[in-house]
Image (spheres, rainbow, N blue to C red):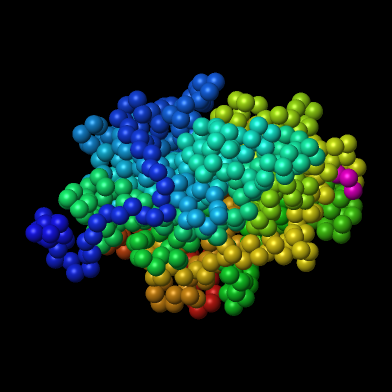
Amino acid sequence: MTPLVLALAAMPSLAASPEIEFGYNDKPAFLGDIIVRTTDGVSDDLLTGGLGSAGIQSATAPSVSAVPTATELRRLAIYNNYRALVDTTSNGGYGTLFGPLLGVSANGVVSSPGDGRIAGTEYLAYANRGEGGQNVTLMVQVPAHFNPADPCIVTGTSSGSRGIYGAIGTSGEWGLQKGCAVAYADKGTGNGMHDLTSNTVGLIDGIRSDADLAGDASHFTADLSDSARAAFLAAWPNRVAVKHAHSRLNPEADWGRDTLDAVRFAFYVLNETYGLPTRKGVVRTIFKPNTVVIAASVSNGGGAALAAAEQDDEHLIDGVAVGEPQIQLRENDRLTVHRGSQARVGSGRTLFDYTTYANLLQPCATLSPRAAGSPGAAFVPAVLAANRCEALVNQGLIGGSTPVEQGDSALDALLAYGWEPESIPLTASHYAFAMPAIAVTYANTYGRFGVEERTCNYSFAAVDAAGAPATWPAAGAAQSFGTGNGIPPVSGLQIINDASVGGPLRDGASISASTGKFDFNVDGALCLRSLWASDSVESLRVRDGVEEVRVKGDLRGKPAIIVHGRADALVPVGFSSRPYLGMNHIEEGGRSRLRYIEVTNAQHFDTFIGNALLPGYDTRFIPMHVYFRRALDLMHGHLTAHAPLPPSQVVRTTPRAGIPGAAVAITAANVPPISADPPESDLITVVRREVFVPD
């Protein structure tokens, strides 16, 4: 008998399925060498890196050696990425509503509660299609309690610009606990940092190496000859190139492909383990018709999952479940989105458009009385905010004769542009911790600008006590794989204003040349905005890059659930999920199986809820992660048990009581379930080309 006949004889139930195509388990051509790590669930594990639930929750990060090992860096990366995506305080729901809740014994028995450690095997590899580009990191985690007779795969494409463990606390948590293989991708971003001074780079496991010695094994090496690098450093010493900003690749254009590649990688490693060995090779026993595949992640990773579903020519994906997706639609003025009596025409705004607008106006908007008492207000000093207001008035962008009036004008402009009123308390913290970094990074990536071009006079470097560029400390570089999120300021690196009066300085402490004042570098913010709003050569490069990442909204009839917080100030619902729902119905019509769940009192950064430096998040916002997990539960039930999907709806939550910084413990009453039969007043509907969202 041939190997295929033997395989059919061994699996008669599969042989009866005409759609099954048996074949040998060939390694995908895009995959490089595969690093395999087996974890015992005690000293090391897939979900917590051996730390267990308490270790993830601890405020003390795991220690590393002066020259860290790959194992130490992996554990540090898991710790920091888990905590960066969820609230790890007990009162916030960690350990009860989410988190490493389950324990899995050596024989694969799942128990609850446990310390969260999950034994299994991890596979790590680069994907590189030979297009002159940089390596994309892929990873597959297969828990020991994976059931090859009932296989499932969940994607975990990283959120933000994070590295390969960027979805460990979101998709990774749910998938590993469910017993699914988790297919991760870093989207071609990650902690790729090339220290141009020492000419050192990171490898796939985070170990630092000389760039020349690393060669193709480098996670990212800037596209500069030795002479060009020397000339650049002579003019601008101590600079560091960062992959997401400086790869010249616009990686977002391939995020859907990267997510699909991770699924292909998962099928390959699963069949290497569970396939049928023959003399001619391993015959595949796990394939699409007998495997449930859910594309899932949050933020940028959620957008990547939607893009993957739209590009899925091979029908690899069965369903989609995503949270607050950063997704950018093709322009379509035939769509109207209503919220109550308000109507907005069009298919939303692009990330670079609304980020550069927020980066310009948010500092001033913090002075509006409506933003008083906002969490993180202390991180946006009023004197500097007033200076920004003055500069904006002089540019004719806002009005008002006092800082308060100017703050009101700036806030009104943001609301008119599309931010929800519920996001007002987030203005200060989002400017302090997100908007400048995103605006600078995406200006570079969309325009495919190299590090030497110093777009809008920005660069990245470590700084000395005065804020001037300095040598990147060895410890910061060595630990960057475990501490970084792929987008400075991080791991000891800062955003530098190279045009500051008196010489280059840390951006937030610099002096604008046009005003001679500390105003959060209004010159740089205006320049970034011009890259969207002007017709310069540089602007055309940026807008061309944005066009490359836009999607149609056609999910090919796949069932999908999007959950999004109404108060999201980073990826506002009016720019993303609401119009995506409408565009999906325009594209698919009666085939659409997309459900949109909008959650009140919820925003983008769950990790801020339990942050002691940001009191007031805890008393205002519930964790979106609860609803992301519920979306995955609903999608899994739909795909495996044919349970009906709930209708699109607004879920009305209740914030926790208490005083800011000391909210009482969350309970189920704060986070009601997604209803199978919501009242009509909560239904989100689509009628032809109009989306209706209730207040």
Instruction: Give residue 587's position: percent from left, percent from top.
Output: 48, 75
Q: Answer above or below: position of 41 versus 486.
A: above
Instruction: Give residue 374's position: percent from left, percent from top.
Output: 68, 42
Position of the C terminus by quadrant? bottom right
Instruction: Give residue 87's position: percent from left, percent from top.
Output: 50, 37
Q: Is residue 74 visible?
A: yes
**Relative to 512, 267 lies left or right:** left
Q: Answer above or below: position of 583 versus 622.
A: below
Q: Residue at x 55, y 33 (%)?
A: 209
Dominant SS of magenta comes to: loop
**Relative to 349, 93 lies left or right:** left
Asked whether 503 falls inside the magenta stretch, the response is no
Q: Answer above or below: position of 361 versus 543.
A: above
Asked whether 512 falls inside the magenta stretch, the response is yes
Q: Residue at x 54, y 49 (%)?
A: 134
Q: In this view of the protein, which residue sits in the foreground, 585 or 327?
A: 327
Q: Residue at x 62, y 26 (%)?
A: 474
**Relative to 84, 615 lies left or right:** right
Image-quadrant location for residue 574: bottom right
Position of the N terminus by quadrant? bottom left
Image-quadrant location for residue 530: bottom right
Image-quadrant location for residue 543: bottom right
Instruction: Give residue 292's position: percent from left, percent from top.
Output: 30, 57
Q: In this view of the protein, which residue sits in the foreground, 237 or 615?
A: 237
Q: Residue at x 17, y 51 (%)?
A: 278
Q: Is residue 424 visible?
A: no
Which segment did they paint magenta? 510-514
**Relative to 610, 226 lies left or right:** right
